[in-house]
Image (cartoon, helix red, strand yellow):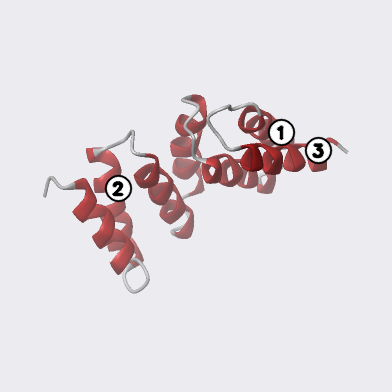
Amino acid sequence: PNSAAAAYNLGVLVSADRPAEGLQWCRKAYQLQPNNPSYAYTYAFYLVENEKTEPAISVLRKMVNEAVAYPDAYAMLGDLLERQGKLSEAMSVYRRGSQNQNLSERDRYTLTMKLKRLSR
């Protein structure tokens, strides 16, 4: 009950057949280790899969605000904001990612291209 790794693995395993249960296990992993970027991102991913976009955005914003070196968090948050029509917020997310020196040069370039696409 207190193993984040076990909760994470179980959440991923059961999510295809039992999405609500998978989400609960991923939430548990995130609650046990909120600073683990894999657990946070996966929790946000399954929140979106379960049509809980706003909580997912909150989890991803926390990651971005902490400048976590997890490029998929920037990409997912930017995409969710774009879908909501919040283009300036999406651009801000992409800009922050493109300037995050903890990300690889390739990941920063990808986020820069997303930013340029929206800047047109």
* Mark 2 neighbour density, 10 Å: few (under 14) some (14–19) many (20 or more): many
Residue 73: image location, x then y, percent = 52, 42
- Return the disc, 3 or 1, that comes first in the chain's sequence: 1
- Provide residue 43's location: percent of width, then percent of height: 38, 49
Identified at 61% across, 32% down, the residue is 97
Report the mark closest to the observer, 3 or 2: 3
Looking at the image, tell me whether mark 3 or mark 2 is earlier in sequence order. 2
Res 9 → quadrant: bottom left
Q: Which mark is residue 27?
A: 2
Question: Which of the image's four quarters has the C terminus?
Answer: top right
Q: Is residue 73 above or below residue 18?
A: above
For the residues marked 1 and 2, what is the alpha-carbon distance in whole angstroms? 28 Å
Report the residue marked by disc 3: 116
Left or right, 58 with reference to 99: left
Q: Secondary structure at mark 1?
A: helix
Judge whether 100 appears above or below 114 on screen.
above
Which residue, given by chain and number where applicable, does mark 1 sit on?
Answer: 91
Query: Which residue corresponds to the image point at 23% horizontal and 50% vertical from the top-left?
Result: 5
Query: Percent x, y for residue 76?
Result: 57, 47
Amino acid at the residue labelled 2: Arg
Q: Amino acid at mark 1?
A: Met
Residue 80 falls left or right of residue 12: right
Q: Are marks 3 and 1 in contact (CB under 8 Å)?
A: no
- Asked whether disc 1 touches disc 2, contact meaning CB atoms under 8 Å apart, the reply is no
